[in-house]
Amino acid sequence: MGLATAIASFNRIVRDYGVDVNIVYRTPQLDKDGNKVRNDNGQVQVDTTDVSLRCSLKILDGSERIINNTVLESGDAVAHFMLKDAQYLNKDTTLKVDYGYGNTYTYKMLKPIPKKTHINVYLTRAGGS
């Protein structure tokens, strides 16, 4: 099986069996000179954009090893994204998953790890309801 076939197969699996997630993508506001805009308290003003993507998501049970110097706990997750979604995957970005019935979970992204057919992103649990 060639690489193009493997990528197409992974994309088909995510399309058919993946979950919908929202990535809260934050970008700093810039003035006309390209400098970051700050409020009265000195904090950087940001524009928030929600991006809807689809991925394969696995909730971890806590028996996993240390990955990238981060201890993963029960409730953390690993997501597999399609290669075309790489532009939205940044470290410390917020990812929200709505499982329905009022179950919404919020994760914080760790460093994305590109593979040949997809992108792995380890997620630490930030909260849920």
Image: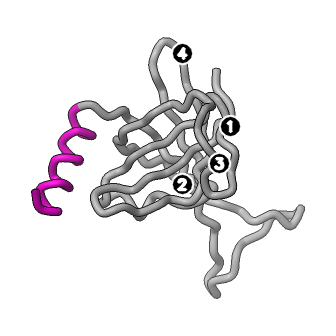
Q: Which residue is more in the foreground, 31 or 87? A: 87
Q: Dot 3: within a 10 Å radius of its alpha carbon, few (fewer than 14), some, or many (20 or more) residues?
A: few
At label 2, the amino acid type is Tyr
Residue tagged 3: 66
Q: Earlier in the sequence, mark 2 or mark 3?
A: 2
At label 3, the amino acid type is Ile
| Magenta part of the chain | 1-16
Residue found at the very far right of the displayed protein: 41
Residue tagged 2: 25
Q: Earlier in the sequence, mark 1 or mark 3?
A: 3
Q: Nearer the viewer, mark 2 or mark 3?
A: 3
Residue tagged 1: 126
Residue 100 on the magenta span: no
Q: Earlier in the sequence, mark 2 or mark 4?
A: 2
Image quadrant holding the C terminus, namely top right
Residue 64's spot in the image, x, y percent?
58, 38
Magenta segment main secondary structure: helix
Q: Are marks 2 and 1 in contact (CB under 8 Å)?
A: no
Q: On the picture, is 96 further left or further right than 39?
A: left
Residue 76's spot in the image, x, y percent?
60, 35
Q: CA distance from mark 1 to mark 3?
A: 18 Å
As drawn, the label of residue 102 is 4
**Residue at x-position 57% and y-position 59%:** 111
Q: Earlier in the sequence, mark 4 or mark 3?
A: 3
**Residue at x-position 54% and y-position 43%:** 95
Quarter of the view holding residue 37 = bottom right
**Secondary element type, mark 4:** loop
